[in-house]
Amino acid sequence: MINPHTGETFRDVYWSQGSYIKASLSRIDWLMRDYHVDEVEWIDPSLVDLLHALSRRVETKSPLEILSGFRTSETNERLQEEGYGAAPRSMHLVAKAADIRAPGVQLPHLYRAALSLRRGGVGFYPRAGFVHVDTGTLRRW
């Protein structure tokens, strides 16, 4: 994974021998933090699993770009005020969502691949250039 806003990357093992690697998850938490205010939240490991499965599904050699992971309520409100359409009860607020791109993978293909996993919510934002995935209830938009 890479956060294109900060340039930070994660290219390591986060699961081994039947359990998550705590130090790796902590690094993922930092990468997916609200970088606007450097606030970190525990990222749902199911979201990390979803991102890993999606990366494998689309067979990308490049890391997934994490455009937005965890968001504070202040950042979410600011995005709403600026017209970015952030949902008032966004899954980003509880560290269970990510807005992503996959270099070399067309956005419609990424969207369909995310839907095929059937692991939560999937949103398609072609004008903004990303796909939203979350570990909430199964839904799409």
Image: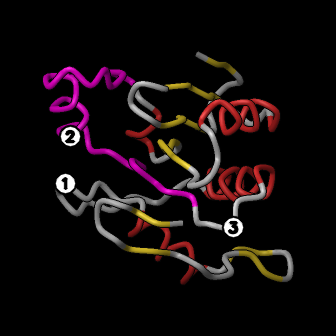
Q: Which residue is mark 3?
A: 61
Question: Is tag 2's residue or tag 1's residue first in the polypeptide sequence?
Answer: 1
Residue drawn 25% across and 34% down? Answer: 76
Pick the residue in front: 129 or 104. Answer: 104
Give the numbered dot on residue 75. Answer: 2
Q: CA distance from mark 3 to mark 1?
A: 28 Å
Q: Check disc 2 and report its element: helix, strand or loop.
A: helix
Q: Secondary structure at mark 1?
A: loop
Placement of 55 over or under 26, stated as above or below: above
Q: How many C-alpha atoms fall within 10 Å of the one at disc 3: few (<14), some, or many (≥20)?
A: few
Mark identifier at residue 36: 1
Q: Is residue 22 above or below residue 123?
A: below
Q: 10 Å neighbourhood of mark 2: few (<14), some, or many (≥20)? A: some
Residue 34 in the figure: left or right of residue 52: left
Q: Which residues are magenta?
A: 64-89
- Number of marks drawn: 3
Residue type for callout 1: His
